[in-house]
Image (cartoon, rainbow, N blue to C red):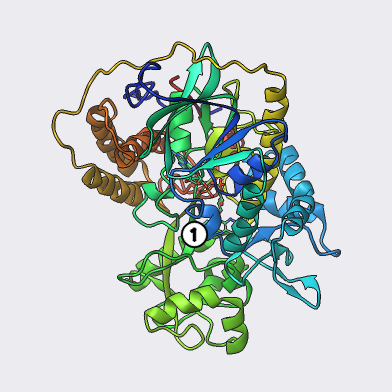
Amino acid sequence: MIVPPPLSVQPPRYLTPFHPKQVPHFFTDVLIVGGGLAGLRTALAVDGRLSALVITKDGLWQSNSAQAQGGIASVLDPEDRIEDHVADTIEAGGPLCDREVVQRVVGEGPRRIQELIDWGTQFDKAGGRLVLGREGGHGRDRIAHALGDATGKEVMRAVIQQVRQTANLDVWENTFTIDLLTHEGLCRGALVWNGLHGKTLVWAKQTILATGGVGQIYRETTNPEVATGDGMALAFRAGAELRDMEFVQFHPTVLYIAGSSRHLITEAMRGEGAHLVDRYGRRFMPEYDPRAELAPRDVVSRSIVSQMEKTRHPNVYLDLTHLEPARVRARFPGIAAICEKFNLDITRDRIPVRPGAHYMMGGVTVDARGRTTVPGLWAAGEVTSSGLHGANRLASNSLLEALVYGASAGQGASREAVGIDDSFHAVPLENARSKPLDEPLDVGDIRNSLKSLMWRSMGVRREAEGLREALENVEHWCRYVLGLQFAAPAAWELQNMLTIAPLMIRAALARQESRGCHVRTDFPSRDDAQGNRHITFRGTG
Ligand SMILES: Cc1cc2nc3c(=O)[nH]c(=O)nc-3n(C[C@H](O)[C@H](O)[C@H](O)COP(=O)(O)OP(=O)(O)OC[C@H]3O[C@@H](n4cnc5c(N)ncnc54)[C@H](O)[C@@H]3O)c2cc1C
């Protein structure tokens, strides 16, 4: 294990004051925080004899899952082999992958995809057979996709419908989870807030976190607004272990047009034969890697940044002009429509792109079934560090992880909850009001500054001096923001991001090598002595 320097600013145990006599109470058997694919798959695994409540801070359609484009990786072609998908996953993630976890997740993939089909998901087919795409790092065509490039939309449609039809499942949308409740070492539920009831104490026999990633901590990101790392921060405050927080995957090709939002341009486009070219129209990837455009994401992202520097241009371009136009339009209708708004025809014009933060490999440590280090608390999906992705996630393995870990965490939590008797009592927990906010603080300004700083210093390339300076700034903000008591989600999100940022920076400082998505320009080589060592943080709880 590599030991990072200790935190100099400790977050408070609870962000806001509460007292059991002053808030409503709600009792459920299983509480699931997060309504993306991991959360909903978890809910569908809960035993029908139990009640389960899913809480999402926005509508059910606002999640990374709903935005997923390329598809879900799995061994679905009779010529493909589980061993090959396992080998590709480990080739991308390196020794920080847990081989047993990889084997289990990959092995369970076909069954989990069949379940989605049984629930009504319409994957793209030709001649009655699934059409399988290829993405960077995969040795074979194994990506099941839907609606061309809108897989998440179709998968979430089917799964949301399934959840709505399941009698024991309840969903509270637009409800923000502020903190997990712990008592005598056990997770007992969560303190949540919404515009209708204000604060509510939700008591649960078992709690599952499925809150997704932290892309919004960066200025340039593919992630939607909800991805602010809340689950990682609230697990940390509840005492859970987090690990591998230095590993953030940057997607190489994010649309870069002034005035447009940062849409991801799916890797599948390169799988279909698109070239990356620089401002002069020169294809450059073969100079950086023999796999060219199909090299793993970290290699492509770094190559793009180098080429942008070489050509002194803020972006590079995806070029599909040599491909058959009708096929391009049929395969990528979503991206074609977005580009059209900006007067770009993807069959004739080059698409301007650059890297953006995309996926968080680190997170709450879970065991093979999804149990965290806090009894009574489980986790699934992007909020976790499960051992599947190691230092670099293989494309389209994350929806697969959400399905497999969602199923196992839901089943595991159910089994535990079935054995616990009902008790409709609140435990004696409170957080006294200590430091009310007496003058307005520009939360948006600090948030923007944090995002810019993280992009500059914790982005595609890092080095000690920039990281130390970033840490100093972030800890300065932490000193005056973390202890304040706010009353609205935007400020709680900022406090969560300020809880996570120092962990990410400290981990990046401690890992003095370049590995997977973590690139230190001052330590450009891999160091095998550090290669299989996790960097862990024990929560403050
Ligand atoms: C643009 C894009 C394209 C992608 N394409 C692919 C792809 O093709 N294939 C692939 O495998 N992966 C893809 N990914 C990654 C993949 O989508 C995610 O890793 C995966 O969907 C994560 O699922 P999740 O359920 O863990 O989290 P999410 O789907 O992000 O869900 C998180 C949920 O938690 C809720 N939440 C968060 N904080 C709180 C809080 N404080 N209180 C209450 N609720 C909260 C949110 O509201 C949301 O419902 C893509 C990601 C993006 C952004």
Residue 320 percent location from the top left of the image: 53, 82
Q: Is residue 117 left or right of residue 259?
A: right
Residue 234, quarter of picture: top left
- Please tell me which residue is depicted at 41% across the width and 44% down the height of the picture: 228
Q: Is residue 488 left or right of residue 145?
A: left
Q: Is residue 180 above or below residue 288?
A: above
Q: Is residue 466 above or below residue 64?
A: above
- In this view of the protein, can residue 263 be seen by the observer? yes
- Please tell me which residue is depicted at 73% across the width and 63% down the height of the picture: 142
For label 1, the SS is strand
Residue 119 percent location from the top left of the image: 72, 56
Q: Which residue is mark 1?
A: 251
Q: Is residue 338 left or right of residue 418?
A: left
- Please tell me which residue is depicted at 57% across the width and 73% down the height of the picture: 269
Amino acid type, residue under disc 1 in the picture: His
Residue 424, quarter of picture: top right
Residue 97 percent location from the top left of the image: 65, 41
- Please tell me which residue is depicted at 67% across the width and 35% down the height of the picture: 409
Does the numbered disc 1 mark a residue whose Cβ is under 8 Å from ligand 1? yes
Q: In front: 156, or 442?
A: 156
Quadrant position of the C terminus in the picture: top left
Residue 195, quarter of picture: top left
